Image (tube, rainbow, N blue to C red):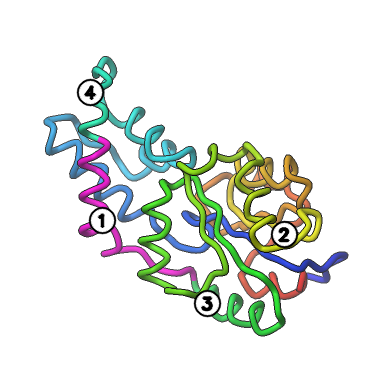
């Protein structure tokens, strides 16, 4: 793919973009449900729940009618379980690390902005690529995507104008929208968890492999 534009920084969604985390999200969610005596969910059911942060995932996964205190206990259990074993089945997508290393070699700034809770973002990034990114940010310090506050904070921290940033993700309703809301360029990835048809409607560009990011560098 020949890019019409090149960018100074690349900011990435995490789940379904940099890393295939779904197997562990399924495992930890169902472990939490079992622990509290709730029915479990299939992979596809949990896939439909991810993308808007942990609280949204747990709120959808547990039975209706839980009290606020019960929900907080189950959130805390999920976080502890994820901290202890949340990387067992997670992996970088093929070709991703090579593309990131080449982007860095070309002098590009790199960051992560995710709707995963901030501690989980830092934990998983420290496990798979410690110290590699220039900045990492998850839900908590800023509102969830598609609110542009997080991406604007990333831009400020990196010292890059939002218009010189390419935001890379797999979701039309959060990733492509946050890029547009912040005035950045939206690159959709076809290997993620969200429907490609929606990405075609909203992305400024669509890529089928991490290597195609280099066309924008």
Given the current orientation, which residue lies at the most extreme bottom position? 105
Query: Marks 2/3: CA distance?
Result: 17 Å
Q: Earlier in the sequence, mark 4 or mark 2?
A: 4
Q: Which mark is residue 97?
A: 3
Q: What kind of element bears circle 1?
A: helix
Marks 1,2: beta carbons within 8 A: no
Could you say whether the residue bearing mark 4 is in a helix, strand or loop? helix
Q: What residue do we see at 58% from left, 44% from top?
A: 195
| Earlier-in-chain disc, 2 versus 3 | 3
Residue of label 1: 83
Residue under label 4, please give it. Answer: 69
Circle 3 or circle 4, nearest the eye: 4
Q: In percent of the image, x 54 and y 37: which residue is there? A: 143
Where is residue 116? Give x, y as percent. 44, 47
In space, the residues marked 1 and 2 are separated at their CA atoms by: 30 Å
Chain-order first, disc 3 or disc 1: 1
C-alpha span from label 3 to label 4: 41 Å
């Amino acid at each position: 793919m020949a890019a019409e534009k090149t960018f100074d920084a690349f900011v990435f969604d995490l789940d379904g973009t940099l890393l295939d985390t779904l197997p562990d999200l399924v495992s930890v969610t169902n472990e939490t449900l079992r622990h509290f005596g709730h029915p479990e969910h299939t992979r596809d059911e949990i896939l439909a729940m991810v993308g808007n942060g942990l609280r949204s995932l747990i709120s959808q996964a547990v039975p209706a009618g839980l009290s606020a205190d019960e929900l907080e206990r189950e959130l805390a259990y999920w976080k502890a379980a994820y901290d202890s074993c949340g990387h067992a089945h997670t992996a970088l997508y093929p070709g991703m690390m090579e593309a990131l290393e080449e982007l860095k070699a070309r002098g590009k700034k790199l960051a992560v902005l995710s709707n995963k809770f901030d501690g989980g973002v830092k934990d998983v990034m420290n496990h798979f690529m410690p110290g590699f990114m220039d900045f990492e940010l998850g839900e908590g310090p800023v509102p969830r995507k598609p609110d542009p506050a997080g991406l604007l904070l990333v831009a400020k921290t990196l010292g890059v104008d939002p218009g010189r940033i390419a935001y890379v993700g797999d979701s039309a309703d959060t990733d492509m929208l946050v890029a547009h809301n912040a005035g950045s360029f939206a690159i959709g990835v076809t290997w993620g968890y969200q429907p490609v048809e929606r990405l075609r409607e909203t992305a400024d560009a669509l890529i089928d492999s991490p290597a195609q990011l280099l066309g924008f560098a």
